[in-house]
Image (tube, helix red, strand yellow):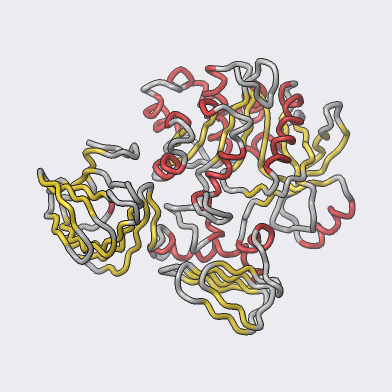
Amino acid sequence: MKKTAASGKRNLYAVIMAGGKGTRFWPLSRENFPKQFLRITGEKSLLQHTVERLGGLVQPRHFMIITAGKQNELVRWQTDGVLPPAAILSEPEGKNTAPAIALAAFRIHKKDKDAIMLVMPSDHHIKNPDGFADAVRKAAPSAAEGWLVTFGVVPTRPETGYGYIQAGKKMPGGAFKVESFIEKPDRKTADALIKKGSVYWNSGIFMFSAKAILSELKAHMPALYSAFAKIEKYLGTAKEAGALETLYKTLEPESIDYGVMEQSRKVVVQAVDFGWSDIGSWNALEEILEKDENGNVISGNALAVGSKGSILMSSGRLIASLGLEDMVVIDTADAILVCPKERAQDVRKVVDLLKSAGREEYILPRTEERPWGHFSVLEKGPSYQIKHICLKPKARLSLQAHNHRSEHWIVVSGTAKVQRGEEVFYVHRNESTYIAPTVKHRLENPGLIPLKIIEIQSGEHLGEEDIVRFDDIYGRNTV
């Protein structure tokens, strides 16, 4: 048996919360493609970095990524080849952290009574993975003894965007008994907390035994505990999805912080300093990305002339700033955000307004990633849509058909291998082909360079739900 951070015969399970909306990172983050799936700090997404840093601590079969709805598919393709499909646990709908953790704890405890759970968000940045691993190992004995361990980050400034933990008596294992949790403070209160000392930022990362968290859920959230206890026999079986669907309709959204951590007397804080950021707003990029000589964070096609302390990020078009100071400018294909850095926490208000107005800009970006590559919507009308599609070398789309639209493909670069009905043929640069409604078809890139095509869709219904899949190598639902 592989030795885990929990030591001895206790297995360590990683529970990654991947159902967040990431509204404060709009317009890059959207409801159907939120922050955890973005490549903000390199070639891998925040979710992929989270899985990677846990690789030396947790066996692949002991991972559990909790998500909901359409994000299930995103999790699957971003972890393909690294984790087994069984690692993905889909809630019928997101109901905050308490139901998600209760579901994970019941499921894990059912098969491993002595399991230790490491629970963490999927969209945080940790600069020092080795320091993180050391902190997990140090916290394991406390978790094994029945304590609920929360990881408290040593503060570096009076931050108003984080919650705080007031530490008390030091425990034998090196952790501290938690005296109180403090909600996100104003600047004056944050200053006072830092001066007082013995306080830590609340990272939202927890470690406890499945047995201990279930006991505390029973004590402090009895209704939630009882609801899951009634369907425990169905967990991990073919009847699980139906049981969860029925159950979740009765649940109210509740956080584990308020429901258990702030109520329990079994909570300790492990002080950590491994370069943590929750990347909660655009301002956080200053902590994790390099700055120029004037303190600007510049990403993509952007120029800063006489500008200071600003964040400029372009997804394509040129951003030219002149004399900006302490501003955020984020450009995407269909939306531009401009705001003072001090208002970056309020971006979610823009998203709320877009949502209430029925605007589609909060749902999906114009450019969407897929396991096979990406596509961008170039133009859209009542009965037509034009896309730019890019397939990675050796990638292929699913074998599919559409009931309500036709497609016309024009190859811009590379060579396309096309299956249309019973035909299989190649389409070269500057050539095109036509796919009629209801005809089974598949697009494939047999070459060593990216395949780029222009797709012109025409029909009365152009939504992604008009895709009927017959075969798919990426594990998506087929008929």
Residue 245 falls left or right of residue 430? right
x and y percentages locating residue 156 in the rendered image? 80, 55
Residue 316 lies in what quarter of the image? bottom left
x and y percentages locating residue 108 in the rendered image? 55, 23
Residue 123 falls left or right of residue 173? left
- Picture residue at 45% right of the left edge, 30% below the top: 84
x and y percentages locating residue 9 in the rendered image? 66, 15
- Count of numbered badges drawn on the protein: 0
In the rendered image of this protein, does residue 257 appear above or below residue 317?
above
Q: Pick the quarter of the image with the N terminus.
A: top right
In the rendered image of this protein, does residue 175 appear above or below residue 25?
above
In the rendered image of this protein, does residue 68 appear above or below residue 297?
above
Camera-side residue of 207 and 350 = 207
Q: Pick the quarter of the image with the C terminus.
A: top left
Query: Does the rendering let one see residue 181?
Result: no
Camera-side residue of 250 and 6 = 6
Residue 244 lies in what quarter of the image? top left
In the rendered image of this protein, does residue 54 appear above or below residue 335?
above
x and y percentages locating residue 436 in the rendered image? 11, 55
- Picture residue at 86% right of the left edge, 56% below the top: 192
Residue 113 falls left or right of residue 72? right
- Picture residue at 29% right of the left edge, 46% below the top: 396
Which residue occupies the extreme front position in the image?
448
- Picture residue at 77% right of the left edge, 42% below the top: 272
Query: Does the rendering let one see residue 32?
Result: yes
